[in-house]
Amino acid sequence: MATEKKPEREDWTFEELREQADELRNRINRFRQSLGRFFIAKQPLIDLMCVAAVAQEPLLLVGPPGTAKSDLVLKFKDALGVPSEDYFEYMLTRFTEPSEIVGPIDINQLREGRYIRREQGKLPTARLAFLDEIFKSNSAILNILLTIINEKKFYQDGEPQPVRLRVLFAAANEAPEHGELGALKDRFVLKAESLSVQDEHFEQLIDAGLANEVHRSLNQKPWVEGHCSLTDLLKANRYLTFLFSQRRTNADGDEQSDRNVFFPPDVFREFQRVVKTLVREHRIFISDRKLVKLYKLCRARAWITSGGVVTRDDLRLLSYLGESAEEMALLREKVPLLLGDAN
């Protein structure tokens, strides 16, 4: 299969996207379901990756080594047909230098008094990126990442310029406890655990793992089936952005926002109740910024799965707000109970 060509434009109109919306949803759903066949018990994580990609919100995968964190991202990237020039990945350490992430200083430009980095092939020019062990990076890297993630900007010679990054996945072996990492952790609204599956799926894991070894040795990528492209995800994001901006008038002549149309009052009250319970009773930190992004993520999940309004099932995203291993375990248990699902 040929790799996806770069789109000539990303300024699709609402009318264009409205005509394509159903097919975009179908493609994304075929993609996530198809990719799930190549993993054991990782479908919820793949679904979450699709939601984060459509919402263009970064996603953190947390789990011990050997639990498929990197493999999930690499197969996700391959299955989208993302060309090498649009992809960047790196494993960070406390010794990682900015030049490894955003490019080396251009010596010729420096001689002329300009501080310019040659960013081609680095994070600022990628549309999809994967940063492994992101919290092991040093303060210089953390400051650069905060600007890129939060502002979608990268500074050249003191001047901000937009980055091409649209989808960011990161991984960590464990959730960091250091306070100075709080700002970066908060940028990742969703933090999902990738856990070992051998206890429940011992035989399937052996069979799938062996098949994976064969594919790697023979340079085969059967998960590249052409169901969906990165451009499809970008179009979905732009379509939802248009919906967010719309103001509609109901039969009584009252103006309605996106929340009035796509977030039923009873579901919104449940959303508010669960959030308040998590904050007040369980001391889960949810910043104002994170709350708004949660709304957007719930809408993206609802659009992907049903194409319509948010349901109680979409509120399961609240399970992925944990900042530490203890909070992740707590939310994994408490959120389903709060939503009335004891299973």
Image (spheres, helix red, strand yellow):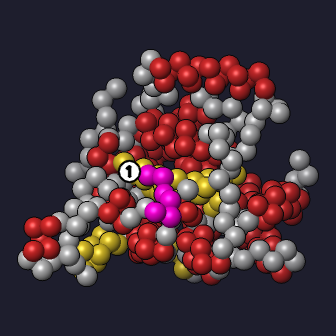
Q: Nearer the viewer, residue 301 or 181?
A: 181
Magenta range is: 90-95
Position above or below: 124 against 285: above
Q: Measuring 15% from the left and 67% from the top, which residue is drawn there? A: 107
Res 29 visible? no
Q: Which residue is mark 1?
A: 88
Position of residue 259 measured from the top left corner of the image (x, y, whole percent):
61, 72
Taken as a whole, is the magenta stretch helix, strand or loop? loop
- Where is residue 256? Give x, y as percent: 56, 76
Was residue 94 drawn as part of the magenta stretch in this picture? Answer: yes
In percent of width and height, residue 60 lies at 59, 57
Q: What's the residue at 63%, 61% (across, down)?
A: 190
Q: Quadrant of residue 154?
A: bottom left
* Residue placed most toward the observer, 199 or 77: 199
User: Is residue 236 left or right of 272 when viewed as pictured?
Assistant: left
**Side (left or right) of 32 relative to 165:** right
Evaluate whether residue 94 shows in this view. yes
State how many labels appear.
Answer: 1
Left or right of 21, for residue 334: right
Residue 224 position within the rendered picture, expressed as x and y whole percent measured from the top left: 44, 29
Secondary element under disc 1, as helix, strand or loop, is: strand
Q: Residue placed at 86% from the left, 57% from the top?
A: 333
Residue 202 located within the stretch drawn in magenta:
no
Give the residue type that dot 1 points to.
Answer: Phe
